[in-house]
Every structure is written in C-alpha cells, then in structure tokens.
Image (cartoon, grey):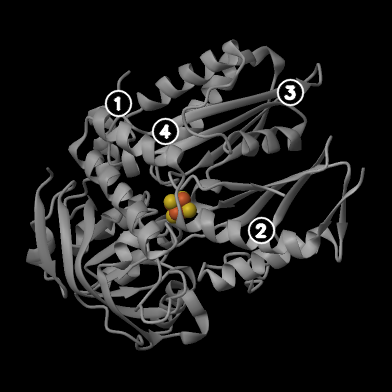
Amino acid sequence: MIREIPSKKIIEVVRGLCIDANYNLGNDVLRAFDKAIEAEESPTGIEVLKELQENARIAWEEKAPICQDCGLAVVFIDIGQDVHITGGDLTEAVNEGVRQGYEDGYLRKSACHPITRKNTGDNTPAIIHIQIVPGDKMKIVFAPKGGGAENMSRVTMLTPAAGIEGVKDFVVNRVKESGSNPCPPTVIGVGVGGTFERSAILAKKAILRDIGNRNPDPELATIEEEILTRINRLGIGPMGYGGNTTSFDVFLEIEPCHIASLPVAVNIQCHAARHKEAII
Amino acid sequence: MPKQIRLTTPLSNEDVEKLNIGDKVLLNGILLTGRDAAHKRLFELIEEGKELPVDIKGQVIYFVGPTPAKPGKPIGSAGPTTSYRMDPYSPKLIQLGLKGMIGKGNRSQTVIEAMRKFKAVYFGATGGAGALIAKRIKKAEIVAYPDLGPEAIRVLEVEDFPVTVVNDTKGNDLYQEGIKRYAKE
Ligand code: SF4
C-alpha cells in the first residue's frame, strides 16, 4: 500500500527540528556533563564543564541557541519505499523547512559560496543524505554541524597492512592535533571501510549515536573503549585547558572495503552534539 | 577553584602583566568585536597608514559572530570563534596598543611573541557557551562596517564576562601547560 506524505508536512517537521536541535541539548550530553564533572581532575576543567551545563540550562529556559554556530543543516532521511510524497519535491521541502527554522528561530545562517564566500542568506542548501528502506514511514534526523569541529575532521586511505592499530593511531593523533580547536569535550565518529566517500558518511552517521551507546558488536565495542581511553590520556581536557575529559565517547562504524584499501574517516563533533529526529 | 580576578577595560600594561595562565578573569566595561572580515579591513587601513574607525589602545577584541538578537535582547548567542584565522592580523594590532583578545584555540608563535613584546594577553572564552555568555552582554552597538552583518565591529558593554588566561605576557601557553600537567603516557 502506498502512503502519501504531503511535502507541507515535511517542511513543518524540518522547521521544528532545526529549532529544537539548536535550543535543547540532548539528555545524553547533559548526563555526560554530570559524569565528567565527577571524574575530571582539573579544577579549570570542572569550571568549564559547569559553564557548559549552565549554558544548556539557559538555552533551554530562554529558547536561545546553545551555540552561536548553528551549523550547516545536515539531514539524514530514511524513506520507506511505500511512501509517496505529494505537493512538491522532497529536497525543496527540506530546504524550505531549514529556511523557515533558521529564520523563525533566530538561528545564525552560516552557509556560503565556497569561493566568493558570499552567504547564501538562508542557511540552505541543506546537506541531505537519503536512504530508501522498507516500510511506509519516513525518519528525519537533523544534526546541525558547526565549523570548528568539522574543520578538524579528516579522511585518509591507509594501507591494509596498517590494520586496526593503524586505525587507532590515526584517530588518536587526529584528536591530539586538533587540540582545543573543536571545543572539547568532543564526540568522535569513526568510519572504517567502504570507499573514500562512504567512510566519511559512516563517520558522520556514527556521531548521531547517543553518548554511552556502544556498538552492538562486542569486538567493535572494545575498540571504541580502547580509543576513548587513549584519547582521555592525552591531557587536552575541557576547552583544551588541560584535564582528563577530552572526549565523551568514540563511535565506530564499519563496512567492507576493497582488498587493496583501508579507508578511515574521523568526524569530530563538539560538545554541542546536537541531533533530533522525527518519524512521519 | 582557579583564582578569580575582576578587570575593567581599557586595560593598562600593569593590568595585563599581573595575569598568569589559568587565571579566571571577569571582564567589565567594553569589548570590541571582530572576526575575519573586520580584521582584514583594519589591517589594510594600517598598511595604508590610515586612521582606524575605532581606537584600539588598551582595548580587548572579542572574536565572535553572534546569532541574530531576538526582539528586546541586545544580542543573540555569542560564544567565541576559533582564533587562528586572526593570527595574520593580530600582531599588528597588538603593536598598536591592543591589550587583549578573546577567542578559542591555539595562537601562532608570532602572536604569542607579539603579546610578550608589547604586553598583551589572549583570553579563552568557553566555546559553545553562547547562551551563557550572551547574558553577560548588556548592550551591543555597531560602530563600524555595518555591511558585514554578523561580522561588523560592535562595541559590547559587558558585566563579569567570564574568560580564562590562555597566553600571558611572559610567553606561557595554557594549552601546552595543561597537556604537560594532565597527559598520562
Ligand atoms: S565547535 Fe561546536 S561548540 Fe564550538 S563553536 Fe563550533 S559549533 Fe559551537
């Protein structure tokens, strides 16, 4: 059976998600602040974490953006194959939702032409990743991505001989070299395998996971924990002022790759780990 | 608790010389704002030997591009932006009497050296704490380059604006010291 979803509905949902994600930090991040305040060794680090906690409370109370960088609009959509969108096209509906959300929510518009640097004026186009799945529903995940942390992200093509140790070293070094720039404590998304572009999408998808949720594969879960421990021994700490809370979590996603390659992507997400979803 | 110091701008050499990395400072008075585009314009005026649209002597520049202000509010969320993009311009401004900069992330050796030589400091504000910081800003007024939108130069009136000393006038760097102190090899 075909289920119809009017494009107007999509606009409305995306608009709401833009505002919700930018004003209201997820409970997983709030819990991570609490835990880190307990565990942090550095007094300055604790001060920073308390400021972040207070900031999230003020943003929620006053309906204000958590961070002034309201990000590029990254949208993941899973569309059931039995869905038929009526009254307009999907991409335009998502962009219109972003346009309205950023305008009505007093969010900063950061999208610009890559060469002339002229601001597009409405934070569009959104970065849209679409997947067709079974069923007749549509799941929309909105994850605004700030520039500071995104700029520290990297993709590399390791040799297969580098193996899992090479992957771990690459991730830890990336976090080390990023230092204070991506607003630590961070969340680290790691995509291993696929092709050049697929590894990056895997890494980005990884950061949509809630802090504290391990990969269901026990072997991968162990690797996540091992990388996290190594990162938190670097000493970078909250805002890079020194301390043992450099990252809240590491999320690893893998996919088969070519026998000749080992693509690895690291997507760094700042503590403003914003993502909200809706199912239509 | 780290040591807390209250300071009011404009700052003198004595004000900044007593600051050490890791000190928590509450700034009062006024701050100037500017990021990439405004810095580029100020720098070009200096190169051409022209007068600047604002007097930077003793002042503190905050690297920020706020969200739009809601009706009735002086400013939107206003956390710091990454500072390294201002590195090419900062030494010249420091030489002309700028006493402080507020941002987040590492500065280049050239900037650190200029701060040591001409007595200035680099403060870190908590990145991402845009809503909290906005509450310490009581007034905001555009004083130059309104065409730059969020990047225009503003004068902010602030009360107990919370920052941490990252680079002091002795050439120290909190980012490096912090890692030395807390890294576990
Ligand atoms: S890195 Fe994140 S928290 Fe820091 S300024 Fe950018 S969006 Fe905000």
Q: Chain of mark 4?
A: A
Front-lying residue, B135 or A84: A84
Callout 2 and callout 3 share a chain: yes
Real-space Cα separation, disc 4 to disc 2, in angstroms: 31 Å
Q: Chain of mark 3?
A: A
Q: Chain of mark 1?
A: B
Q: Amino acid type of disc 4? A: Ser
* Res A247 label: 4
Real-space Cα separation, disc 2 to disc 3, in angstroms: 31 Å
Please state the horizontal and vertical placement of residue B32, each as a whole percent of the image. 31, 75
Q: Quadrant of residue A36?
A: top left
Crowding around mark 3 (Cα neighbors within 10 Å: few <14, some 14 to 19, many 20+) is: few
Query: Disc 1 beta carbon < 8 A from ligand 1?
Result: no
* Res B36 label: none
Q: Nearer the viewer, mark 3 or mark 1?
A: 3
Q: Which residue is mark 1?
A: B183
Q: Nearer the viewer, mark 2 or mark 3?
A: 2
Callout 3 and callout 1 share a chain: no
Q: Residue at x 45, y 85 (%)?
A: B145
Q: Which residue is mark 3?
A: A255
Please state the horizontal and vertical placement of residue A259, each as a whole percent of the image. 81, 16
Real-space Cα separation, disc 3 to disc 4, in angstroms: 24 Å
Q: Is residue B105 above or below residue A95?
A: above
Front-lying residue, A159 or B114: A159
Crowding around mark 2 (Cα neighbors within 10 Å: few <14, some 14 to 19, many 20+) is: many
Q: Chain of mark 2?
A: A
Q: Which residue is mark 2?
A: A13
Say which element carries label 2. helix
Q: Earlier in the sequence, mark 4 or mark 2?
A: 2
